[in-house]
């Protein structure tokens, strides 16, 4: 499941602007989301800490890739890649900015995940290419491009219960990338992730993150900012190989001195083979300026080795 933030690691075309003033309930929504997610994280921890013996592993089986893959959602899966295996995820997305003029492309959105012993996972996110096409007043357009920062992280799965699955991850954003799209300094993120199966086919994933990130060098001189970031994903496996998802996520601060922002996305995933996943997604801004775009469309895949 799925920037310069802990959530929008694949949404790296963000530009900091003032958030929409019309969304006056943003802070109330954030506080409510924070309270609910914190409660569920704590409840899941105590239940998952004592996994029932004989309970089937929710991250195993012939359709396990649909549960383990991070993309195309912004929130990450609570499953880790099994020791000795590797998962490669990639995709492309086309974003339309808030202004409605021009568009941007983001690719290859590469994420490399390596299974380690004791339910651990190494995560690598190489630089992402961002190409921004801006129309000119007299006709034609101007193209600018650059690379995002590289990210390295470690995820640990703490355990699972009959319905619950609990994990945590830390991510480090390296001071790298281009002056317009990279990170001027080292950034940090800590995420708690909880999975809850309502039925065998319908599940919720809750992720709550704390981030301390730096802007690109050419954006507010690479200033740091803190943010708290809630994320909720609902998945529905409508057939053996098909799965639908819907997601709402946000950040308490979308940049230095900026207010909150919330986006939503949804899509479909297809298990082409036991170790091959294909997906398509659409997303839309709900409020604020999280990502710097009004809507987008994307597609990608995952390969398990």
Image (cartoon, rainbow, N blue to C red):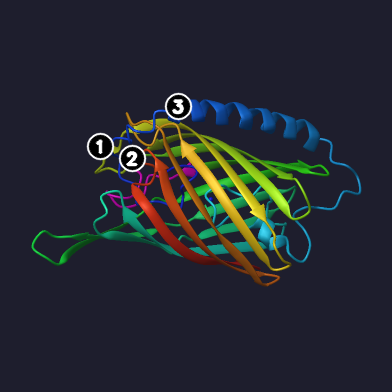
User: Which secondary structure dominates the residues rendered in magenta?
Assistant: loop
Marks 1/2: CA distance? Answer: 7 Å
Horizontal and vertical percent position of residue 81: 68, 56
Q: Is residue 178 above or below residue 242?
A: above
Quarter of the image with the C terminus in it: bottom right
Residue marked by disc 3: 27
User: In terms of sequence position, does the residue under pointer 2 or pointer 3 come before the other?
Assistant: 3
As drawn, the label of residue 267 is none
Q: Which residues are magenta?
A: 172-184
**Callout 3: 10 Å neighbours few (<14), some, many (20+)?**
some
Determine the residue located farthest toward the bottom in the rendered image: 273
**Callout 1: 10 Å neighbours few (<14), some, many (20+)?**
few
Horizontal and vertical percent position of residue 291: 38, 46
Q: Tag 2, which secondary structure?
A: loop
Marks 2/3: CA distance? Answer: 23 Å
Q: Residue at x 52, y 44 (%)?
A: 248
Q: Tag 3, which secondary structure?
A: helix
Q: Residue at x 67, y 45 (%)?
A: 204
Marks 3/1: CA distance? Answer: 27 Å
Residue 108 figure quarter: bottom left
Residue 59 figure quarter: bottom right
Observer-nearest of 30 and 86: 30
**Callout 2: 10 Å neighbours few (<14), some, many (20+)?**
many
Horizontal and vertical percent position of residue 132: 27, 59
Q: Nearer the viewer, mark 2 or mark 3?
A: 3
Determine the residue located farthest toward the left in the rendered image: 138
Query: Are circles 2 and 3 on residues that touch, CB within 8 Å?
Result: no
Residue marked by disc 1: 221
Q: Residue at x 65, y 45 (%)?
A: 205
Residue marked by disc 2: 215
Q: Is residue 104 above or below residue 215?
A: below
């Amino acid at each position: 499941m799925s920037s310069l933030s802990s959530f929008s690691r694949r949404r790296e075309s963000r530009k900091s602007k003032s958030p929409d003033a019309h969304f006056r309930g943003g802070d109330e929504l954030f506080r409510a989301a924070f309270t609910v997610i914190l409660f569920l994280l704590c409840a899941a921890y105590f239940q998952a800490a004592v996994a029932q013996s004989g309970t089937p592993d929710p991250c195993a089986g012939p359709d396990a890739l649909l549960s383990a893959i991070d993309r195309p959602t912004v929130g990450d899966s609570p499953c880790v890649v099994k020791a000795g295996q590797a998962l490669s995820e990639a995709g492309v997305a086309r974003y339309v900015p808030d202004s409605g003029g021009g568009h941007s492309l983001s690719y290859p959105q590469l994420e490399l995940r390596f299974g380690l012993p004791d339910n651990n996972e190494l995560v690598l996110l190489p630089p992402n290419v961002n190409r921004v096409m801006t129309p000119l007043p007299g006709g034609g357009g101007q193209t600018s491009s650059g690379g995002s920062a590289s990210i390295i992280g470690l995820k640990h799965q703490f355990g699972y219960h009959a319905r619950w699955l609990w994990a945590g991850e830390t991510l480090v954003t390296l001071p790298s990338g281009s002056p317009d799209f990279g990170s001027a300094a080292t950034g940090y993120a800590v995420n708690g992730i909880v999975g809850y199966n309502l039925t065998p086919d319908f599940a919720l994933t809750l992720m709550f993150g704390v981030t301390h990130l730096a802007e690109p060098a050419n954006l507010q001189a690479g200033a740091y900012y803190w943010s708290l970031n809630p994320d909720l994903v609902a998945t529905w496996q409508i057939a053996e190989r098909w799965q639908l998802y819907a997601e709402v996520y946000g950040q308490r601060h979308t940049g230095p001195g900026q207010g909150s922002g919330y986006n939503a996305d949804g899509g479909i995933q297809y298990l082409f083979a036991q170790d091959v996943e294909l997906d398509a997604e659409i997303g839309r801004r709900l409020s604020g300026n999280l990502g710097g775009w009004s809507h987008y469309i994307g597609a990608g895949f995952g390969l398990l080795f």
